Image (spheres, rainbow, N blue to C red):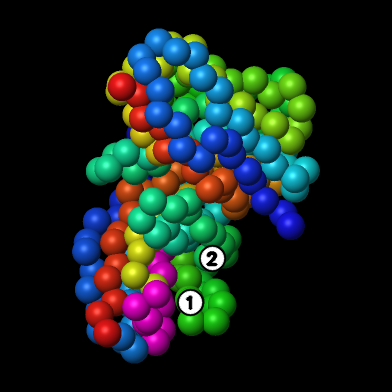
Amino acid sequence: QKEVEQNSGPLSVPEGAIASLNCTYSDRGSQSFFWYRQYSGKSPELIMSIYSNGDKEDGRFTAQLNKASQYVSLLIRDSQPSDSATYLCAEGLGYGGSQGNLIFGKGTKLSVKP
Amino acid sequence: EAQVTQNPRYLITVTGKKLTVTCSQNMNHEYMSWYRQDPGLGLRQIYYSMNVEVTDKGDVPEGYKVSRKEKRNFPLILESPSPNQTSLYFCASSFRTGYEQYFGPGTRLTVT
């Protein structure tokens, strides 16, 4: 059973701090990884995609991928109250065919306190 | 504007009354999918389509039907809704399987 595991939280950080969100996955064949942000009652919004080992930075967000450890993380620098949301990690198992469906974790709830 | 649209956004209905939730995307994406989201259970895939006329079951297909007659549209059909189908439903699309998916705004369905 292919799985993506996330700590459900809540993860509480003070405004201006770095929030660190983590995700582990079970399938070594996974090739693509995504982080989504979801506000309560709203749809998931893509914030980062990462395909290669290492770090990928986009503004205040940095995604880190370690395929050997089957681990992907998201760092949010200078956290703002508007970052308070649930963050979903997803893995793509390949390109093409049914194995290419994304597998989503259940999400980590982040709370940024002013 | 590139987007996925769903209609209706909110729907309250009664057990057994057939309904259709529409989904449309204007990004020429091959792949489309339906999910339901319930508290504590995360996103669960109902059905997906890798291209026109190609659909397949996801993890929770019972009680649902889909069709993909055109590339841009992927309606979700509930032939005889039951209260356990009360949920928040999302349609999503992507360039191809395995790539990032873009979600519609969601449809909140209540079946009484």
Residue B30: x and y in percent read 72, 38
Tag 2 near tag 1, CB within 8 Å: yes
The reply, left or right, for residue A49 in relation to residue B50 is left
Q: At x 37% / y 81%, what residue is drawn?
A: A80
Residue B62: x and y in percent read 41, 16
Q: Secondary structure at mark 2?
A: strand
Which range of residues does the magenta coloring cover?
Answer: A70-82
Q: Is residue A10 above or below residue B45?
A: below
Tell which subunit mark 1 falls on. Answer: A
Residue A9: x and y in percent read 22, 61
- Type of amino acid at the residue the image marks with label 2: Met
Q: At x 70% / y 31%, what residue is drawn?
A: B73
Q: Are marks 2 and 1 on the same chain?
A: yes
Q: At x 64% / y 46%, what residue is drawn?
A: B4
Q: Nearer the viewer, residue B37 or B48?
A: B37
> Circle 1 is placed at which residue position?
A61
- Type of amino acid at the residue the image marks with label 1: Phe
Q: Nearer the viewer, residue A9 or A69?
A: A9
